[in-house]
Amino acid sequence: MHRLVRALVGLLVTVVVGGVVVGICLAALLPGVGIVTGATEYRAELVTDLDDLSERSTVYDAAGNEIGVIGLENRKNVRLDEVSPLIVDAVVATEDKTFWTNDGVDLPAVARAALKNLTAGEIEQGGSTISQQLVKNRILSPKRDLNRKIREVLLAIQLNQDYSKREILQQYLNTVYFGQGAYGIRAAVERLTIRPDPGNAFCGCRVATLQDISVADAAMLAGLIQSPETLNPFTNPDGARARRDFVVGQMLEEGYITEAQAAAAAQEPLPSVPPVADLRPRTSWAEEVQDRLINDPRYSVLGATPSERESAILRGGLRVETTLDPVAQENAQRAVDESIGEKPGFTASIVAMDPATGAVRAMVAGSGFENSQYNIATSTPGRQAGSTWKVITLAAAAQKRFSANDQVDGTSPCEFGNLGRTQNAEGGNGLMTIRSATAGSVNCAYVRMQLAVGFTDVIDMAKKLGIRQNTLQPILTLTLGTIESTPLEMTTVVASLASLGVRHDPYFVERIVNPQGIVLYQEPHPGIRAMDEDAALCTVDQLRSTVTGGTGTGAAVPGWQVAGKTGTTDNRADAWFVGMTPNLAVAVWHGNPEGRVPGAGFGGQVPASIFRRFMTAQLSGTTPVDWPAPPGWCNAAGQFLTVGGRSLVPDGFLAPTPPPTAVVIRPVPTTRPPTTPTTPTTTTTPPPSPTTAPPSPTTAPR
């Protein structure tokens, strides 16, 4: 109440000093003691604390480069000393000429407005100063009535008692809307001063900065405050130019610029490149970061619920530092572009992860993200992973101490009663070791191995290694990758092996910092033991055989020990390669994003090529790191795989249903020596496998 009294006294003194005419006008603006008295009822609102403004959050890569902005209002607060004096002078000359000297109210302007209002019988002009506009935008509503105008005047005076002129102007420049989705002066400069510039290889454009801005652009921006939509330079260039010329004239009149500067400003063309209309993420990285910050409970520091976290992200002005390595991202994109070539309708996705932390270093989401916002790398359910899924079965077998020399039958086709049947894509008949079955990607051998390990253990291992979806089922072709997985999940699987059995869940955000520089979140890099180290080493050792002499030789990286696995689905619609070195894990998918369209080829072709190109570039100049030697049991003398596991003898051996063969009939003697009886000798053919049962999906071993 005391502050209100002081404010009223100050206002009355101003009226007296201003003279009779101003007093009459002010009386018209504040008609009657009743209204002034009524204004005291609003004393609770005479608080000039300015609430925090909604700010966009900015996303950065690991090198500190900006890679995206997300938010509801495109605003980034600035300090007044960051703003060019030309902008300050243009705004003051246009919106409040006496700003630096008035006490929050410009009496001549009030007089003009009051006289206009008297003749009109209603509030048509407000004579608002910058202080009054700030009060209206930040404390009150824009409603035009006498009671609100009284409060606006009183609060504007109080504002000037509580804040310095520079503080008020800084708050004003950060608050005001300039149109085209630009809130505050920084966004206005960034979005409304874009012009073509063929010399700029990055964007083909030129954008002014807060400090380096022309008189013409400063005047244009100041002119937009009056009516940001109707004076839009892109939809109403004539109106925008006329308003700009008016502001330039005001700046000249106030002595802020010279005649020569005014003449040059009049000749400068308006900006001609409209900005993007909203703040939705424009890259797969910005989109992924936004989704995870909202939906992942690990970021509960931003809010307990997704809606609270969304508000913090879209309004909080956060600095979000991601794990994206710009060099790795460039290498990944180049590897995709160079490997696919001209292949209409087909694209590729690659995810690269640091196995020691789970940090995602590169992610190519596939072509067309800008239009569809569909991220092949992370969007569930993903695509059939083909034989890359055999990595999981192999890990489950190693965890049960199966030797790489254990014997398994790869004869094809193979049928298992109610579980169904499948067949090899090519080759692989007969007994073979687990190592050779892995190198050759033999389907029937792996189906039998899956039965020896047990569905429960295979599914359990999949979840431990990083498959997050709940779609896994105990079906015969589980090990052949007929249940969908995402490239991110498959990268996590091989990353867990590369870290010798410790799973680090993938993450994209390293650190979150608020506008005051306080770190709100720092990724702790937690690790969970998924399998023991010896089992992981045995798995990796066998997967190296795929690259050194199996289906994945096209993925070899000179000088480095690479472990990996190819995968190809039916009709060659999806082709994969997952691979790793001790310090980097990668999954590559290649196919048609519209669906399972034949034409992707084998996993040992385009995906292996992408992997090799990426890893060769990424590891260039680094010292090769070798894998530790596998444990002795990994290469011990082999046993036979049975339904119950392993056996020293082939009793209960997982033998195949023999393929159809020709009937061999040998002649039977018509007479027999009386002293040496004989029996007929014939070879019968087992019945062929049912021809009515549809074959299960198969994967090609390349």
Image: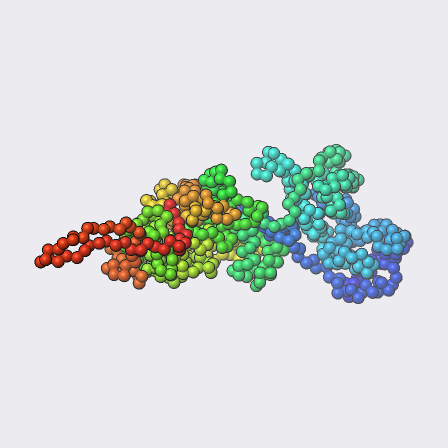
Note whether 449 is above or below 611 in the view shown: below
State the residue at coordinates (58%, 59%): 309
Task: Report the residue at 87% width, 63% height from top.
Answer: 33
What residue lies at 53% left-to-right and 59% top-to-bottom? 296
Whether 216 is drawn above or below 304: the answer is above
| Residue 392 left/right relative to 235 | left
* Quadrant that contains the C terminus: top left
Given residues 508 and 86, the one toward you in this image is: 508
Q: Is residue 565 left or right of residue 665?
A: right
Q: Position of residue 332 (x, y in %)?
A: 47, 43
If the image is split into quadrants, where does the N terminus sit? Answer: bottom right
Q: Depth check: 300 or 428 in front? A: 428
Residue furthest left in the image: 675
Q: How is the image coloured?
A: rainbow
The answer to whether residue 39 is left or right of residue 315 is right
Instruction: Work out whether residue 501 or residue 524 is closer to the camera in this orientation and state it.
Output: 501
Q: Measured from the top left, where is residue 692 in percent x and y?
A: 39, 55
Judging depth in this view, the residue of 287 and 513 nearest the camera is: 287
Q: Position of residue 428 (x, y in %)?
A: 31, 49
16 lies left or right of 212: right
State the image coordinates of residue 129 (x, y, percent, origin top left). 78, 51
For residue 419, say whether it is visible: yes
Identify the residue shown where x is 87% and y is 51%.
116
User: Is residue 251 visible to the viewer in this orientation of the structure?
Assistant: no
